[in-house]
């Protein structure tokens, strides 16, 4: 069964009641999650960027001639009240069904990082997207990144790549200017000077930066390719999670999808049509789709399930 056929089956089996109230917002509570994993997909050997600055032997490379000097890592404290308000995972929170669901989801992604297949792509570059806006992709990207960052032997970089409508920084309580777009616009800007290290496990954030009319071209540019290679190949312990624009709402998403190793597609139960999902999947390489994450499923009592491809 193909990924598109599996997606159609997933949508047909999901409740179709219209969503309203708090559950309708992308930043609000996810009622239930169901990750549909492609067991046959594996990815290539990868490496990652550091969390706490680079090893001494690499500093000369990062501060190459013509680039801005590296400054000490910037830090910020994530607003825990804000996380709870948005029903996001908190590192000191209780063992909830939501947190358990994301633990199961991340295991499928980490398995592909740990047991890669040669010539299949950089599996540590993980894109979280959706077919249309409002399905919960940012909520899921942040929760996935936090859950991974709490692992003992992982470092995580969360990149807000939804440059037209960035929301990662706002959700985490980070107020800053400068980010991904500045790195792509000016080769002299050092990536390390725009990263923000959080107080949640080994989580660092790269904001979207200043909106730009040529964002699509920038995300598909040689500069973006070089940046992704740096993220994927320089260090061995980092996973990069991208909060991407929706596939049907912005062409930037397709440009980013062509350069990552894994894609997680968020699907809102009762909202996303089979036609929209089929159209969205038709715009990307479905061999990179690690799974479909069914979001905002209404059930009583709440249930959190996982179904893998056999």
Image (cartoon, grey):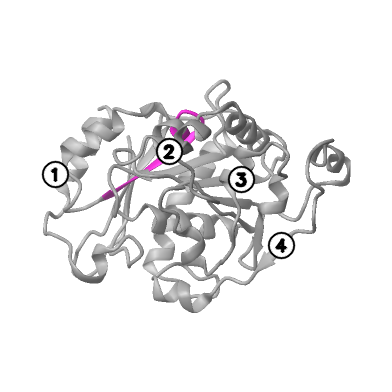
> Are circles 1 and 3 on residues that touch, CB within 8 Å?
no
Q: Residues within 10 Å of mark 1 (few under 14, many from 20)?
A: some
Locate residue 93, reporting x and y percent. Answer: 49, 75
Q: Is residue 218 left or right of residue 303?
A: right
| Badge nearest the viewer, 4 or 2 | 4
Quadrant of the image for the C terminus? top left
Asked if residue 94 shows in the view, the reply is: no
- Residue linked to disc 1: 12
| In this picture, residue 173 sits left or right of residue 276 | right
Q: Which residues are magenta?
A: 256-267
Question: In the rendering, at what x and y percent does residue 253 appear?
Answer: 40, 37
Find disc 2 in the rendering and name its residue.
Answer: 263
Circle 2: is it few (<14), some (14-19), or many (20+) Cα within 10 Å? Answer: many
Residue at image mark 3: 182
Label 3: how many Cα within 10 Å (few below 14, some 14–19, many 20+): many
Q: Are marks 3 and 2 in contact (CB under 8 Å)?
A: no
Q: Earlier in the sequence, mark 1 or mark 2?
A: 1
Q: CA distance from mark 4 to mark 1?
A: 46 Å
Q: Sequence order check: which comes first, mark 3 or mark 2?
A: 3
Disc 4 secondary structure class: strand
């Amino acid at each position: 069964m193909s990924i598109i056929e599996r997606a159609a089956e997933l949508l047909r089996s999901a409740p179709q009641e219209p969503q309203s109230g708090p559950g309708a917002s992308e930043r609000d509570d996810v009622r239930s999650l169901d990750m549909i994993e492609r067991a046959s997909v594996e990815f290539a050997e990868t490496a990652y960027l550091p969390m706490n600055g680079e090893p001494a032997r690499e500093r000369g490379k990062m501060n190459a001639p013509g680039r801005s000097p590296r400054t000490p890592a910037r830090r910020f404290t994530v607003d825990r009240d804000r996380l709870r308000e948005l029903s996001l995972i908190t590192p000191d929170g209780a063992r909830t069904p939501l947190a358990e669901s994301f633990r199961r989801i991340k295991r499928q992604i980490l398995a592909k990082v740990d047991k890669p297949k040669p010539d299949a792509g950089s599996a540590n570059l993980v894109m979280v997207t959706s077919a249309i806006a409002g399905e919960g992709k940012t909520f899921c990207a942040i929760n996935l990144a936090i859950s991974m960052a709490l692992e003992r032997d992982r470092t995580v970089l969360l990149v807000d790549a939804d440059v037209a409508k960035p929301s990662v920084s706002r959700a985490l309580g980070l107020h800053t200017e400068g980010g991904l777009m500045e790195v792509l616009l000016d080769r002299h800007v050092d990536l390390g000077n725009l990263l923000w290290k959080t107080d949640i496990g080994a989580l660092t954030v790269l904001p979207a930066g200043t909106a730009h009319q040529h964002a699509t071209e920038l995300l598909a540019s040689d500069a973006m390719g070089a940046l992704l290679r740096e993220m994927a190949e320089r260090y061995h312990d980092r996973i990069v999670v991208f909060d991407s624009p929706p596939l049907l709402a912005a062409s930037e998403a397709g440009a980013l999808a062509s350069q990552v190793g894994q894609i997680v597609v968020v699907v809102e139960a009762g909202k996303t049509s089979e036609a929209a999902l089929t159209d969205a999947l038709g715009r990307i390489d479905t061999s990179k789709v690690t799974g479909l994450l069914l979001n905002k499923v209404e059930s009583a009592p709440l249930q959190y399930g996982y179904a893998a491809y056999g």
